[in-house]
Image (cartoon, grey):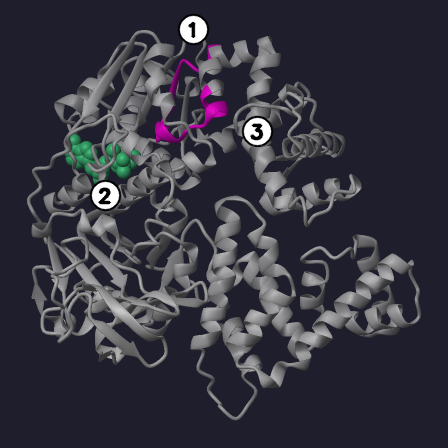
């Protein structure tokens, strides 16, 4: 089989490597650790090392296993190896941890006590099951939010802990979580389903409990390669160690500065323990960056230098300064999005491909305004690793309430939210409603009303349905009186949707709350075509159109939109980092904990280092996001970038070196030519009397911090605040 690769010679594996990369690729120590900054060729080393192992060390592709972070990365890796070897690889295992675990469990379902066709639960399925379990335990969902239980269970599994491993405690909270975990485990086993965290844990247990199986794979895989090693969690690392055993070699490549999944259990410490766990490790550092211009790299280095907990490394490039990093201070988020669309338009006009550009952002909720601007400018885009705004679960739920308020006979909307948030309307009740609807050829709503009036079910179920009917009736009763955004606000509030997500723990719940608030923002900005017609139906039609198939097709050249988290490992000639504002990025949730702030900073480093040729940083002086308007100062990450690599784009397209943001966003004691001074008393039409605490920026967008006697401190745009000196 190996002879097939004979056409390739060794020099072609090595001729595009620098000496340090070559040292790594050709290392003949059993284990290799490549610890290096962004864009230094870690992934490239991994790919070339695979070719080397096949070509020179004569390991069959069948004896290699490579782990990547996303399926997209796995596909790309395969392509790169095929290209290098000049033929298609078969037999080699390449995939994500989850993908590989799934493959193993499929092959060894008996050994891990799973039914042959076990089902994988995605996160929403898992939540539904957790709820079911909790209901059977008579636990009050208000007091014990199911999402929190789900988060807790997954956290334990990520650490490798089963319910049986966890000690009983006297802490009532922990004890309840533990009881739920136990029950949940039992139900999963009984019905033969398996969640994402379970995939990994079960695959680990496969090794642990079945020495013969482990030995088989230990013998098979002579070398194991892991990309993005800094983001492996405890179970993944333990799995690797068992598989490697005493014989197989491991190549791990990673960058402690790019560890961005600490919040999901990833352990950057794995890098530190690696040399201890794998004796005879060859460690290589790569210091030359091949991806970015020196301006971009300089910015990235300066930002990450502020972190205290680093292994520390130097990263340099000889690729030349390149263009300066552009910084655009937008008036608001629409201005920001228009600016980006405009820049993209020019980029394409200059003969570039759209897919060579990316817009990256911290929070999913930011995509809505960007999407709208791209649609408006007719620029095809694709959202990668995430859903478009109007397709997100929480948004669909909220829209379903709005649709029911408009037309209670909307069956799809009815089915979607009749028991969301949970109000005691179980599957059997819904089935009964469906039956009555079928029987009488009426809508689900009409059927539900019938069931209530005719008291066809047990009192508890009937009541639950009655409560829902009353809720929708009440909500729609006020339709005509309220402006659209208040209707939306009302819908997410009265329905209990927002409260339900507020109770969820972790980033996901937070993101859902933000998205719901963002929906209210969308309603506030919505301009109906026909002002004489009711606005809600017009809005819902617009949404339906927007969420049609306007996202670019698979093969269409399109701009890529994604969160910073999804951008890991990727590179693009042109990158926009949108929303570079305090509270948005770094995210407000991270401001209090130094550890989380460092993780945000690493995320900024990841973002900046995605750019090859040109990087745009944009921020908005005022931003309506999550349904309310805020005035945040420019992100600290922007302020940490040396001034001489930045070019501030001003209105009217004039360009100058930045002055306004550079000193922590504060200019001088005197608001330049504003006519006001620090400490001066002022009067504002709405907020009343206050005292000037600070000035920020210059020119028409200069802002002023005023401490008002009644409403506390506000940050206002000086030009539009109409302050009167006292
Ligand atoms: P990240 O930390 O972002 O995952 P990385 O360290 O994995 O980055 P790669 O993606 O492997 O870096 O490489 C970055 C870019 O530099 C790629 O376009 C790669 O082809 C190029 N590159 C790496 N090494 C060399 C080299 N020796 N000569 C020319 N180009 C190189
Ligand atoms: Mg990489």
Name the quadrant where ligand 2 sits.
top left
Label 1 element class: loop
Instruction: Name the residue tied to disc 3.
Output: 156
Kindly indicate whether the residue at mark 1 contacts the one at mark 2 (C-beta within 8 angstroms): no
Tell me how far mark 3 sits from mark 1, CA to CA.
Answer: 28 Å
- Name which of mark 3 and mark 2 comes first in the sequence: 3
Tell me how far mark 3 sits from mark 2, CA to CA.
Answer: 33 Å
Residue 451's image quarter? bottom right
Tell me how far mark 2 sits from mark 1, CA to CA.
Answer: 37 Å
Instruction: Name the residue tied to disc 2.
Output: 609
Question: Which label lies toward us, 3 or 1?
Answer: 3
Question: Which label lies toward us, 2 or 1?
Answer: 2
- Residue 551 in view: yes
Which mark identifies residue 629?
none
In this rendering, is residue 6 above or below 442? above
Q: Which residue is depicted at the point 64% across and 30% down?
A: 171
Residue segment shown in magenta: 219-237
| Residue 573 horizontal/vertical position (percent) | 21, 50
- Name which of mark 3 and mark 1 comes first in the sequence: 3
Q: Nearer the viewer, residue 35 or 143?
A: 143
Alpha-carbon neighbours of circle 3 within 10 Å: few (<14), some, or many (≥20)? some
In this rendering, is residue 185 above or below 550? above
Alpha-carbon neighbours of circle 2 within 10 Å: few (<14), some, or many (≥20)? many
Q: Which residue is depicted at the point 65% across and 44% down?
A: 146
Label 3 element class: helix
Which mark identifies residue 246?
1
Q: Nearer the viewer, residue 677 or 174?
A: 677
- Residue 439 in view: no
Label 2 CB less than 8 angstroms from ligand 1: yes
């Amino acid at each position: 089989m190996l002879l097939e690769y004979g056409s390739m010679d060794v020099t072609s594996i090595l001729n595009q490597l620098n000496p340090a990369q070559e040292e790594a690729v050709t290392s003949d120590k059993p284990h290799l650790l490549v610890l290096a900054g962004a864009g230094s060729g870690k992934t490239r080393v991994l790919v070339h090392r695979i070719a080397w192992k096949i070509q020179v060390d004569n390991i069959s592709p069948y004896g290699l296993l490579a782990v990547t972070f996303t399926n997209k990365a796995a596909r790309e890796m395969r392509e790169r190896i095929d290209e290098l070897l000049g033929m298609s690889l078969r037999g080699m295992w390449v995939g994500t941890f989850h993908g590989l675990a799934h493959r193993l469990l499929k092959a060894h379902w008996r050994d891990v006590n799973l039914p042959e066709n076990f089902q994988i639960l995605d996160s929403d399925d898992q939540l539904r099951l957790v709820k079911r379990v909790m209901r059977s335990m008579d636990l009050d969902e208000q007091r014990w939010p199911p999402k929190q239980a789900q988060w807790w269970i997954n956290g334990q599994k990520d650490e490798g802990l089963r319910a049986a491993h966890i000690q009983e405690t006297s802490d009532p909270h922990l004890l309840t979580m533990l009881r739920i975990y136990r029950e949940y485990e039992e139900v999963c086993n009984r019905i033969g389903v398996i969640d994402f965290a379970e995939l990994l844990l079960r695959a680990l247990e496969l090794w642990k409990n079945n020495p013969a199986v482990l030995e088989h794979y230990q013998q098979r895989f002579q070398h194991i390669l892991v990309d993005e090693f800094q983001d492996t969690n405890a179970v993944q690392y333990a799995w690797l160690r068992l598989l490697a055993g005493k014989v197989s070699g491991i190549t791990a490549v990673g960058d402690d500065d790019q560890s961005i999944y600490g919040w999901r259990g990833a352990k950057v410490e794995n890098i530190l323990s690696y040399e201890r766990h794998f004796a005879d490790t060859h460690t290589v550092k790569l210091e030359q960056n091949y991806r970015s211009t020196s301006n971009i790299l300089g910015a990235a280095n300066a930002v990450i230098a502020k972190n205290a907990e680093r292994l520390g490394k130097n990263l340099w490039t000889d690729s030349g300064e390149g263009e300066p990093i552009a910084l655009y201070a937008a008036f608001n988020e629409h201005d920001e999005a228009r600016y980006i669309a405009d820049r993209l338009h020019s980029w394409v006009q200059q003969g570039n491909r759209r897919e060579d550009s990316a817009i990256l952002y911290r929070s999913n909720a930011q995509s809505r305004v960007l999407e709208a601007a791209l649609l408006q400018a007719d620029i095809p885009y694709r959202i990668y690793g995430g859903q478009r705004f109007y397709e997100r679960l929480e948004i669909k739920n909220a829209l379903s309430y709005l649709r029911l308020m408009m037309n209670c006979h909307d069956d799809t909307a009815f089915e979607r939210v009749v028991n969301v948030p949970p109000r005691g309307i179980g599957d059997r009740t819904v089935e009964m409603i469906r039956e009555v609807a079928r029987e009488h050829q009426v809508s689900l709503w009409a059927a539900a009303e019938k069931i209530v009036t005719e008291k066809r079910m047990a009192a508890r179920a009937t009541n639950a349905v009655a409560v829902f009917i009353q809720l929708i009736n009440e909500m729609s009763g006020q339709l005509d009186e309220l402006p659209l955004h208040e209707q939306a606000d009302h819908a997410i509030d009265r329905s209990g949707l927002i409260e339900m997500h507020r109770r969820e723990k972790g980033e996901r719940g937070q993101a859902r709350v933000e998205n719901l608030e963002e929906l209210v923002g969308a309603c506030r900005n919505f301009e109906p075509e026909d002002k004489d017609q009711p606005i809600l139906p017009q809005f819902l039609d617009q949404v339906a159109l927007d969420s049609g198939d306007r996202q670019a097709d698979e093969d269409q050249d399109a701009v890529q939109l994604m969160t910073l988290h999804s951008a890991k490992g990727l590179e693009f000639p042109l990158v926009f980092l949108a929303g570079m504002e305090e509270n948005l990025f770094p995210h407000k949730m991270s401001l209090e904990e130094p550890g989380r702030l460092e993780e945000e900073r690493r995320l900024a480093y990841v973002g900046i280092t995605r750019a090859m040729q040109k990087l745009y940083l944009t921020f908005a002086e005022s931003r309506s996001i999550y349904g309310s308007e805020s005035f945040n100062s420019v992100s600290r990450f922007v302020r940490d970038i040396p001034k001489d690599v930045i070019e501030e784009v001003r209105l009217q397209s004039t360009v100058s070196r930045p002055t306004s943001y550079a000193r922590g966003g504060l200019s001088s004691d005197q608001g330049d030519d504003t006519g006001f001074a620090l400490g001066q008393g002022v009067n504002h039409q709405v907020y009343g009397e206050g005292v000037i605490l600070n000035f920020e920026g210059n020119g028409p967008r200069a802002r002023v911090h005023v401490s008002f006697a009644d409403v506390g401190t506000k940050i206002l745009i000086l030009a539009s605040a109409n302050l009167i000196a006292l």
